[in-house]
Amino acid sequence: MKLHAFSLCVFACTACAFDVDDVLDRVDTALTISAFQDNLRARLSGTLDLEIYNFEQPAPGLIDSSIDTLFNPRLTLFLDAQIGSQIYFFAQSRLDRGFDPSNHGAQVRLDEYALRVTPWEDGRLTVQIGKFATVVGNWVPRHLSWENPFINAPLIYENVTPIQDKAAPISPLYFISAPYYYGKYAFNPVIWGPSYASGISVSGQLGKFDYAIEMKNASLSSRPESWNVTENGFENPTFSTRVGFRPNEAWNFGLSASEGPYFRREAEPTLPPGRDIDDYREFVLGQDASFAWRHLQVWAEFYEARFQVPRVGNADTFAYYVEAKYKFTPQLFGALRWNQQLFGTISDGYSHSVRWSEDLGRIDIAVAYRFTPHAQLKLQYDYQHETTGPGDDNHLLAAQFTVRF
Amino acid sequence: MRTRGLLWLNAVFPILPVALLASATLEGRVELPKSHSAPVQAKRYQIVTKGGVLSTQPPLAVVYLDGAFPQPASLPMKQVAQKDLTFLPSLLPVRVGTKVEFPNLDDTYHNIFSYSPAKRFDLGRYRPDERPIPTQVFDKPGLVILRCDIHEHMRGLILVLNTPHFVMTDTDGHFRLGGLPAGRYTLKAWIDSRTTREKPVELKSGETLHVDFP
């Protein structure tokens, strides 16, 4: 039934694509307002995503569903406003079944809101305050459905590890075995999606270099609930930075770092006596590179992360991906991504070293067709394989139809 | 020497006035829609934000004489540049078969594309200093909407026409179209993608006809 509804929507939208396109262009104009001789301008825009996932249990990544075929609709609204040339405000609100694909009921969230001030025209300094995506890495600028060549995120942004932010493990063995007994949402990835945590950032450009520093209320691995300033204050902030080097328009290189406590307040009673959540931190070092020329775009990110885990010690992991997108025709593009995550070892408490999670690799293949500048269909296949331990496989098939207005 | 000059004038004179007298002129005014506000640039995920307000582009119309006219052997190259994250000019009327180049005058990548039935193309990402400058030949009449895959707010229009007799209005809607052949034609005013007004006209040699599109 859901599949039929999805197919019907896709067919209906494509059948009258060009008429709809003209209407959407007019909607775009109608949703832009200005006042004070164009000094105050605001635009409301958005995307409607209809997604279908088919996978094996346990569901891969951050998909939270006990059923194998999941229909996940999402309406996203953006507000962009400019006051003169120096002040910019944006907000993102979503109506969906959860921040990550899930079979739960509908919810409405204000995912992002930020005020940005750019005092100088040359971009040497920008200050931003609010709830917004992290400055770390190079995936954030393409994480929304229209810009993302894939339907999901790279492995590092969605592969849940044995790290828990709501409770400390009682022993090393508990730490590595807990994921088999509890729901996936009790655990955290190294970076949770675009990490829309709250805080302040300073960024800018100096010649061929750019920089960004942010202070946020939650670590990169923190769950979406922790990003709200009403839920999580700034008593234990996370600091992140990225320095970029752009030798020319085609190449862009970046170095990122992040450091901050990753436990939520409710984990405090489970910590060893005399210890505080500030004593257990997440450290992330990242390197990113991108290349673009004509119809080819390539991105890569490499991350080394360390979690200080109570009663366990340091849990280290290394993850990377290489992603390429190529436009075969003006409307058809394909994308390929190779992801891998490797885990270090910890002491199991009995003088043995054990890997704290299974190493895994994943290949993502996607093809997309843009019917118009406002409508796009993506199809994706993922194959994930554990390269250590039981060697479990998982296959994911996904389709996403997006209307942008 | 003087005699030779007079002889030359005698030879040329009968031709020149005839050519001038044979051409008709059209002038008038097109009622233009209200000016749109300047676009809002989405800068949500840019680490580096530069200042600057995008300029308002006033609406303009293209007035052209519809009819069957011979195709010339070659047409001059036209240009639509990208400067300050806008298309310059924002509206370009061209004759069928015209080659248009798209120089990037900004210090960032642009990726110009069109999905319009009259011309579907994607130039890919190209740098400001890239040579040769990307070009496209517009070989079918119709409206081509230009966009940039990187800068969502950018919009440009190329109106591909079958006639050599066209002119753009000024920002008040005034136009003057000279050098027209005598005869009965349809005069059209393209105002936007959904609005093209037309009026039948009869042009007589040496006359100036006034036509308004209210």
Image (tube, coloured by chain):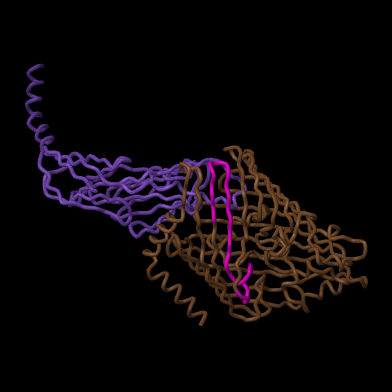
Q: How many marks?
A: 0
Quadrant hosting residue A398: bottom right
Q: Is residue B4 above or below residue A143?
A: above
Q: Is residue A97 magenta?
A: yes
Colour of chain A in the image: brown
Q: Whole-percent x and y of residue B54?
A: 48, 43
Colour of chain B in the image: purple
Closer-to-camera residue (A34/A133): A34
Q: Name the side, left or right, on which A178 lies relative to A256.
A: right
Residue at the farthest front position:
A36
Q: Is residue A149 above or below residue B96?
A: below
Q: Which residues are magenta?
A: A79-105
Q: Is residue A90 above or below residue A150?
A: above
Q: Whole-percent x and y of residue A365?
A: 57, 68
Residue at horizontal 62%, vertical 57%? A112
Q: Name the side, left or right, on which B211 lies relative to B78.
A: left
Residue at the farthest bottom position:
A1
Q: Whole-percent x and y of residue A50?
A: 52, 71
- Whether residue B130 appears in this view of the structure is no
Residue at the farthest top position:
B2
- Whether residue A337 appears in this view of the structure is yes
Q: Name the side, left or right, on which B85 lies relative to A315.
A: left
Quadrant hosting residue A178: bottom right
Residue at horizontal 55%, vertical 63%? A76
Closer-to-camera residue (A393/B17): B17
Q: Whole-percent x and y of residue A351?
A: 93, 70
Q: Is residue A168 magenta?
A: no
